[in-house]
Image (cartoon, rainbow, N blue to C red):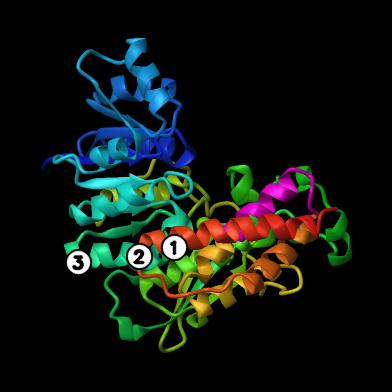
């Protein structure tokens, strides 16, 4: 059997480095054919040597020039630059799967090109489906490439839906940790600080997604993501607060039975599921130890505590560019909060005002989606002045 050749877009981030760990654990099944990052080229030198990678891309052309001049990479390594470079890495003839884990929209064009070239895509960037779900799923459908979800909740559902006819599925249930303020009295949310918001109970993630977890904007984005990945309308996607992050998601079957996927909270599980799909081999992450007591809690999310979840659902129902507007407004609001210019409870307030102010429409092209994204950012920044603390 040939080892499956992987290209990683976003190789220096936490998804990228965990992908390398999984590849390292299965050398006869997986190999790395290309690595791409934004600018941190020094962090690619080690993996390039270890995995014998001949092609590297850096989105930042200045970083690519530096990497070439450094002489740090083995002789003969091709070092590409810009979006075109990322696209070339994703579409290398030998590559059969692309791990798409670039933050923001920079991964959009390379990922679409990979799907069009019939490369299977393990998708870790939420933005791609939230902004361009219509175009991304259409590209996969036309070429026949597989779109595999890396996000732990969606990967759980992907595992649960395997081998089940669509008629058996009644609802999807995404689990949510509830974030840093799950148990904070509602009246105290007004006074919570950035440092408190950055303490996630279970997952070790970047600051943006940790704050999104506290507001549940993250879960709202995941509802939109699930809508595209599984072709299930948002009103058939439930959210439940599950503080332990052991149950990664559930499906409700037509007869009323529920099925769940459980593992320790390590991204190695969903990443490996994508990379080895449809095979299962031992995962290089801790296993659930059922010789120890295990308590699993589940409660419905309180809409007063998590108003961003309701706003995301409304955007999902509106459709068109509304999810892109939600995402852009939330990014601006989180940046304002992080900069100390907005209260924590101001995030949802600002996102709600932005959604009301920017009209959504059905996008005919990716450019129209990116236009809505830019418009929403500008409007939200303006509206933020009125909410400044
Ligand atoms: Mg998730």
Cα separation between marks 3 and 1: 21 Å
Q: Residue at x 47, y 56 (%)?
A: 127
Considering the numbered disc 2 on the image, is that residue within a helix, a strand or a loop? loop
Give the number of the disc on residue 365.
2
Q: Closer to the N terminus: mark 3 or mark 1?
A: 3
Please, what secondary structure does the residue beneath circle 1 have? helix
Could you say where residue 75 lies in the image, as x and y percent from the top left?
A: 22, 13
Label 1 close to label 2 by CB (< 8 Å): yes
Residue of label 1:
369
To which quarter of the image does residue 26 belong? Answer: top left
Residue 43: give x, y in percent of width and height.
43, 24
Q: Nearer the viewer, residue 331 or 295?
A: 331
Q: Earlier in the sequence, mark 2 or mark 3?
A: 3
Residue range corresponding to the magenta coloring: 328-342
Kindly identify which residue carries mark 3. 142
Magenta span includes 109: no
Q: What residue do we see at 52% from left, 73% from top?
A: 360
Residue in the image at 29% along x and 35% along y: 85
Is residue 319 among the parts visible in the rendering? yes
Q: CA distance from mark 1 to mark 2?
A: 7 Å
* Helix, strand or loop: magenta stretch: helix
In the image, residue 253 lies at what x, y percent?
A: 41, 82
Mark 2 to mark 3 CA distance (whole Å):
16 Å
């Amino acid at each position: 059997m040939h080892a499956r050749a992987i290209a990683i877009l976003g190789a220096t981030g936490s998804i990228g480095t965990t992908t390398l760990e999984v590849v390292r654990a299965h050398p006869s099944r997986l190999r790395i054919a290309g690595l791409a990052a934004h600018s941190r080229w020094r962090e690619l030198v080690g993996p390039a040597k270890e995995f014998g990678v001949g092609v590297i891309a850096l989105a930042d052309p200045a970083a690519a020039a530096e990497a070439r001049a450094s002489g740090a990479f083995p002789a003969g390594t091709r070092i590409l630059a810009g979006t075109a470079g990322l696209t070339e890495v994703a579409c290398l003839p030998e590559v059969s799967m692309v791990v798409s884990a670039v933050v923001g929209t920079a991964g959009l064009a390379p990922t679409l090109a990979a799907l069009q070239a019939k490369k299977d895509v393990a998708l870790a960037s939420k933005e791609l489906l939230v902004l361009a779900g219509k175009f991304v799923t259409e590209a996969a459908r036309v070429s026949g490439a597989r779109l595999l979800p890396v996000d732990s909740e969606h990967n759980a559902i992907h595992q649960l839906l395997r081998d089940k006819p669509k008629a058996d599925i009644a609802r999807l249930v995404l689990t949510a940790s509830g974030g840093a303020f799950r148990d904070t009295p509602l009246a105290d949310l007004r006074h919570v600080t950035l440092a408190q918001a950055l303490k996630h109970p279970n997952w070790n993630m970047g600051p943006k997604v940790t704050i999104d977890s506290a507001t549940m904007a993250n879960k709202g984005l995941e509802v939109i993501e699930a809508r595209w990945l599984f072709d299930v309308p948002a009103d058939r996607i439930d959210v439940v607060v599950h503080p332990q992050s052991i149950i990664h998601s559930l499906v409700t079957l037509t007869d009323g039975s529920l099925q769940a996927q459980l593992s320790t909270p390590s991204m190695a599980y969903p990443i490996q599921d994508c990379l080895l799909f449809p095979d299962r081999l031992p995962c290089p992450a801790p296993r659930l130890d059922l010789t120890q007591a295990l308590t699993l809690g589940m409660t419905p999310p309180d809409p007063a505590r998590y108003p961003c979840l309701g706003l995301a659902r409304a955007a999902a129902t509106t459709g068109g560019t509304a999810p892109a507007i939600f995402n852009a407004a939330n990014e601006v609001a989180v940046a304002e909060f992080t900069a100390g210019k907005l209260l924590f409870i101001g995030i949802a307030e600002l996102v709600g005002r932005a959604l009301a102010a920017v009209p959504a429409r059905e996008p005919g092209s990716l450019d129209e989606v990116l236009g809505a994204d830019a418009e929403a950012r500008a409007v939200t920044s303006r509206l933020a002045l009125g909410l400044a603390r």
